[in-house]
Image (spheres, rainbow, N blue to C red):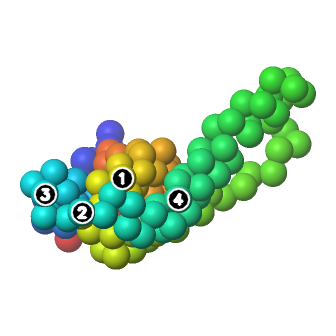
Amino acid sequence: MSVELPKNYIRRTIGVLICFIPIVLLVSSVIYSIIGIAQRPFGAIGFMIAALFVAVFNLYLSFIRPWWRYRKHGSLEAIQHASVAPLVGTLLVILGGIFGFGAIGSAMVGLLAVVLDIGGSPWFLVCTWRDSSVWDAPR
């Protein structure tokens, strides 16, 4: 018989707020640009391209590489477990969102990076939401 810990709603709310900061920042940037206040479409695009590169790299290490290895060799025994670069893409997106606020092109590239980056903060929240040891520590 397992005892279910009580839900810690304060900790979960803080986690949601922190983990979705990049998305809120980029959506605000798009809205700011659509309203017509900002005129530059690709400000701070370098940060966003770097974040997109990190996102694709994380996606490759987590899904494509093991799939390819399994398909080629029939097992995953010899594969070394490579860690993704956690939060690197998220930090790059936040920097790009701050320095290029109002740039709709940069914000769209950043949103794509956030969606693809499985090592980012929104995906951390999604993957750990049901794990009570992360969110619902005993009081």
Q: Nearer the viewer's eye, disc 1 or disc 2?
A: 2
Say whether disc 2 or disc 4 marks the residue closer to the N-terminus.
2
Question: Disc 4 residue type?
Answer: Ile
Q: Nearer the viewer's eye, disc 3 or disc 4?
A: 3
Q: Quadrant of the N terminus?
A: top left
The residue under label 2 is: 39
Say whether disc 3 or disc 4 marks the residue closer to the N-terminus.
3
Distance from the alpha carbon under mark 2 to that under mark 4: 20 Å
Residue 108 as seen in the image, left or right of residue 88: left
Distance from the alpha carbon under mark 1 to that under mark 2: 11 Å
Mark 1 vs 3: CB contact within 8 A:
no
The residue under label 1 is: 105
Q: Residues within 10 Å of mark 4 (few under 14, many from 20)?
A: some
The residue under label 4 is: 49
The percent coordinates of residue 110 (x first, y second) are: 40, 55
Question: Disc 1 residue type?
Answer: Gly
Write down the quadrant of residue 38 in the picture: bottom left
Helix, strand or loop at label 1? It is helix
Mark 3 vs 2: CB contact within 8 A:
no
* Closer to the camera in the image, 107 or 36: 36
The percent coordinates of residue 51 (x first, y second) are: 51, 60
Residue 31 visible in the picture: no
Write down the quadrant of residue 70 in the picture: top right
Q: Residues within 10 Å of mark 1 (few under 14, many from 20)?
A: many
Question: Disc 2 residue type?
Answer: Gln
Mark 4 vs 1: CB contact within 8 A:
no
* Closer to the camera in the image, 133 or 93: 93
**Disc marking residue 36:** 3
Tell me if residue 32 comes above or below residue 95 in the rendering: above
Mark 3 vs 4: CB contact within 8 A:
no
